[in-house]
Amino acid sequence: MILKRNLLVMALASAGLTMAFGVQAATGDNGAQTAPDTAQQTSTANGTNNSNGGSSQSTTNSKSQKELAKSLSTVTVTGFSSSVEKSIDYQRYADTIQNVVTAADIGGLPDQSIADALTRLPGVSAERIAGQASQINCRGLSGNFIETTLDGREQPSTSGSNYIQFDQYPSELINMATVYKSSQASLIEGGVGCTIGMQTANPLENTKDQSLNVDARGSYDGQAHDIVGDNPVGYRASVAYQGKFLDNTLGVGLGFAQLYQPHISEQFVGEAFGGLQSLDPNNPNSRQAYVPEGIQLQQDGGTERRTGYLSTVVWKPTDHLQITGDMYYSKFDNDYYGYGFRSQNFYGNNAVITNPILGVGNTLLGGTVSTNPNQSNVQFSNETTADNYSTHTGVFSGGLNLKWNSGPWHVESDLSLSHAESNEINVDTTADAYTGLGTSNPTLMNQSVTYALNGLNVGSASVANPGVYTNPNDMALSRYGVYPYIYHDRYRAFRTAVQYDLENNPIFTDIQAGVYLNNHTFEANRTVWVYGSEWNSYPVTGEPPLPLSSADTQEVCWKGKFSGLPCFLKLNAPAILAQYGIQPNPQLDLDNNSWSGIQSGTVHEKVRDIFLMGDIDTTLWNHELTGNLGLRVSHTAQASSGIQEVEPGQGVPMTDGFGYVANDFIPINVGMSYTKWLPSMNLIYHWTDSDQTRFSVAKVLSRPPIDSMLAGAGSYITNGQYNVWGGTSPLLRPLTAMQYDLDYEHYFDNSSGLFTAGVFVKHIDTFVQTNVTYNNFDFASVGITVPNNPATGQPYLNGSYTTAYNAQGSMVRGLELSFQKTHFLPGIWSGLGFGANYAFTQSPFGAASTLGGPPQVQALPGLSRNVASAQIFFDNGLFSANLTGNYRSKFVSDSQIAVTNQIVYFAPEMVWDLQTAYNVTKNVSVLFQVLNLTNQPTRTYFGNPSETGTIQYFGRTLYAGFNLKI
């Protein structure tokens, strides 16, 4: 009998492997125009339960659930040690390869946002935006490869793309977060890198009938003193309440969290390099070099206010039925400005460069850049800048969840609505030094700047006649441009799953089936308003440079690490405009800025999924074997509506926001559909009660970045050919991958620690590349109509097409190690604990880039070969301390924004955080916390570390406050 069962198990595993390796996508890749309403989007975790009725819990296997509950009930310690030991239990009894971070109590995570907590897990790292963790990278892949849910509901994005900005989620409102490294059929598709499931608390599971948690902290960041107009003081406060009523059949949970802090960033920016050119355009025999666009020196300041709300009502009238209604809302107001100095347009014929400092490959790393006296309409200047990047975002996620259990039957249904919005004002203001101000023909002064890049450190810069740039009488506002980014992201989803427990089955403990329906709509709205022209090199009639006054300016000089850089004028640009009766009013502009219409549009995705999965619990060679085997089938219809530019007079009349009627655009709606079969298998072989080996194989899927699927396209005519540009395409295919995981895990007694070692391989079939140009392209193949040539009466010839496309994929592989141990010393030191994680990831992927001058190959965005974290903590019930360090080696990202987004290398960084707390009484504790203990900057470069990208300092933040628990 044992032999027959073993043979059956081995045959089952072989069948699962064959299916996983052999199943190919059954697609209907129909690249045709669709109706405007054909589409919508992605998914949510399925078929299992969680404490708040939403996402997959660690296991659906009934035996594993009992073991997990038993182990959790034995955790008697409190504080951070409790959180660590619970995380170990969830990982140990999970069906998939996953890592978990839990809060010892609601509001107990010692992190600024949930992103900080996630970076303590192996293979997980974060990109720091404005000094705080925001976009998560997982197993060498960027945030666009990560699926994110809250209580089982897929989260909309405020980023304008697929990746989630995790600083939108206060840690005080999150009870647990799980990173799923391997997949299973009941888990929502979308995470080729990983899936991150956040969960809120179920008030019926609170150990107390009533509980209240109040946390208040004041903050201080001394770097704010170096930034004009900034305030170093902030605060962080939260209140969480949980109550049980009606004989513990009704649970209510309410949460509020607010963060207020200064926005702090001091930057030295080296801009991207252009092509090889003469350093003296007036001398054809002069030395040649790769010349950068320019340099920027900027102080970013302002305020950040994040407010989060959470409400949960759980009704469990019987042991068989539970109904949960919950809502999460977070609003993030990031009101920040950038004042500084920008020396720009070094290349072309605008400037003469002397005393050059040349780097590897003849890249210009420094020199003296001066106005070219022989060039008319010169566009080289040492500009004073006053930018406004204020961004207001909001996320709503809520729904109704129903669970019904009766005997072997388990049913869960969930109806949800999620919405995100983002509005970045994006103001770019420049002022220049002029001669002839007050006359009808002011002209740029002849100017020069001497600069030197300093690799991964702050460089140097000085200007001739520095007094000019701090004298309002010599300066005038040349241009004031408003270019807002407005995004809306909406999900409407329904899912239901049924689980039937099998008794006395030699292999399977249950079988599950489910359906998932999700409609996703993404909307991008671009508007624009511009006064004047940069450098006034091409004057706009009626919009001359506006002279400044001392009332609207303030002289600012640099301090600290940036001291010695040129002083500049802080401009009150709105007041300058108001002085001349000018009021900005950004609108859709189809006349002078037609890109605002082309970059606007809507993308719809309609997802229809079904899955079938069985949980395994059997024996093989006298050892227990658990896991699951399943298949998910996902059908997606995607389409985008926008406008396409055609010849004047051949379009549909469209009126823009300024009242201009355009006749050179037509509405378009382009889309396609596909079906993907996603098999998965997770096997756990239990050598002993403390040792187990996991093997997982699955086909996984991530959808293309939503913003890269916009349909809008501009056009132009050259030599009888019709050319189209846009850089995006609604015909992009999804990114699928076969992934394999093998893990060994050892768990110490009483959940006091673990050691794990694992390897993984991902074979990704394609990557999305944007702004790729094809010549002599067949436009009819993608539904684009080529207009007629008035001279011939026939369609123009096919020309170039700048779009997005599915490039060849690659392989990502890696090694992950993790060790955690608590209570390894006796006596008063028993509260000491230690944890360390290390991940090594590599990929042969390479993409060509010329932003650093000579062509070079850049690695896969988001991939750091080495990622590590370590923490040492002490908790004796009275006093606790936690020191955490996170390291990641260099990686590629497009997060640097100079004038446009630029793909750069981020240098290695090590960030340390410290938190201590003391329990004054049973209910009151005081704490002290330091974030970014060593004031680690963010440093980027263009391929070679000597080619400075951005050197950016944020300072260290000190927190002090109290916590009250009732």
Image: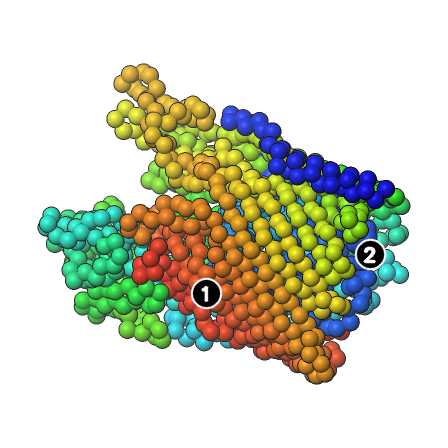
Residue 100: percent from left, percent from top: 66, 59
- C-alpha separation, residue under disc 1 versus residue under disc 2: 42 Å
The amino acid sitting under disc 1 is: Glu
Residue 114: percent from left, percent from top: 60, 61
Q: Is residue 290 above or below residue 874?
A: above
Residue 677: percent from left, percent from top: 63, 34
- The residue positioned 73% from the left and 48% from the top of the image is 627
Label 2 packing within 10 angstroms: few (<14), some (14-19), many (20+): few
Q: Is residue 468 left or right of residue 115?
A: left
- Which mark is drawn over residue 676? none
Q: Secondary structure at mark 2?
A: helix
Q: If the image is split into quadrants, where does the C terminus sit?
A: bottom right
Name the quadrant containing residue 25: top right
- The residue positioned 36% from the left and 23% from the top of the image is 787
Is residue 5 visible in the rendered image? The answer is yes
- The residue positioned 50% from the left and 45% from the top of the image is 811
Name the quadrant containing residue 211: bottom right
Closer to the camera, 863 or 130? 863
- Which mark is drawn over residue 909? 1
- The residue positioned 57% from the left and 74% from the top of the image is 883
Is residue 653 visible in the rendered image? The answer is no
Q: If the image is split into quadrants, where does the N terminus sit?
A: top right
Q: Is residue 826 left or right of residue 338?
A: right
Closer to the camera, 512 or 729? 512
Q: Which residue is mark 2?
A: 66
The reply to whether callout 1 and callout 2 are in contact (CB within 8 Å) is no
